[in-house]
Image (cartoon, rainbow, N blue to C red):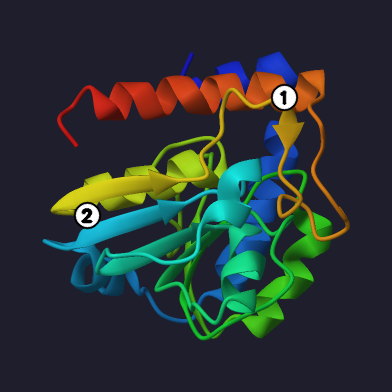
Amino acid sequence: MNFYELVRREFGFSKRLDYLSALLLNMRIEEDLEYRLVSLIEGKRVAVVGAGPSLVNVREFNEDVIIAADGATNYLVKLGIIPDIIVSDLDGISVFPDSLYVVHAHGDNILTHWKINYMKDLVGTVQVSPFGRLKLYGGFTDGDRALILAKNFGAKSIKMYAMDFDSELIGRYSKPYYLSDVPMNSFKRRKLMIAKEIVHDISRKDL
């Protein structure tokens, strides 16, 4: 049983809906832009920016490339910072700068595919067997998928911001309808623990 089969069993996600979301995403992609991930990341110092509560303390970056995880984009744009790459499963982002988007298809985000209308440059990822122009890079949450991108495409170094896996709060920028940080719930905690394990596994491989 692969990782995503285990995740579907753990959380009750639907493989059929995962495929449906993937099919709809693939229909949106006109060109394979994976080469741009290589040109943006390879040999660069990369900042991976999560949407945890500590995000509001972040004001500037010294890295060459910024990869934002979904709703973190909303905060960065407020600061006048445009991420080079945005990794999103479409539930947190509500502004759409001129960035390269890496959009993940899963069964729970079919109703938010309309956001893709505002994304000019797009790479699609899935958690089923890839087909068409879709990619399977791995990862579970937007934050750890962003880290995997940086690692897989040859970043010189990676620094993580606002990846607050052990916080008792969910960051206000995680969802566009949050007005402030909210208390952690058991569902989110379980997701963050999986993401934390993924990040630790990657970190042990000499980032």
Res. 4 image quadrant: top right
Res. 189 image quadrant: top right
Please rate how many residues cluster around mark 2, counting C-alpha atoms within 10 Å: few if below 14, some from 14 to 19, many from 20: some
Res. 67 image quadrant: bottom left
Quadrant where the image shows the C terminus: top left
Res 167 seen here: yes
Amino acid type at circle 1 is: Glu
40 vs 207, nearest the viewer: 207
**Horizontal side, residue 19 vs residue 49: left or right:** right
> Could you tell me which residue is drawn at 42 percent across and 68 percent down?
85
Mark in front: 1 vs 2: 1
> Could you tell me which residue is drawn at 39 percent across and 29 percent down?
199
Q: Position of residue 149 (x, y in %)?
A: 33, 51
**Horizontal side, residue 169 vs residue 128: left or right:** right
> Which residue corresponds to mark 1?
168
Is there CB contact under 8 Å for labels 1 and 2? no
Res 12 seen here: no
Above/below status of 170 relative to 106: above
> Could you tell me which residue is drawn at 21 percent across and 66 percent down?
38
Q: Position of residue 103 (x, y in %)?
A: 55, 61
Q: Position of residue 95 (x, y in %)?
A: 69, 76
Amino acid type at circle 2 is: Phe
Q: Which mark is residue 153?
A: 2
Above/below status of 136 relative to 188: below
> Mark 1 vs mark 2: which is more N-terminal?
2
Above/below status of 98 relative to 104: below
Q: Position of residue 44 (x, y in %)?
A: 17, 63
37 vs 18, nearest the viewer: 37
Q: What's the distance in space between the residues labelled 1 and 2, CA to CA?
A: 32 Å
Kindly state the secondary structure of the residue where label 1 is placed.
loop
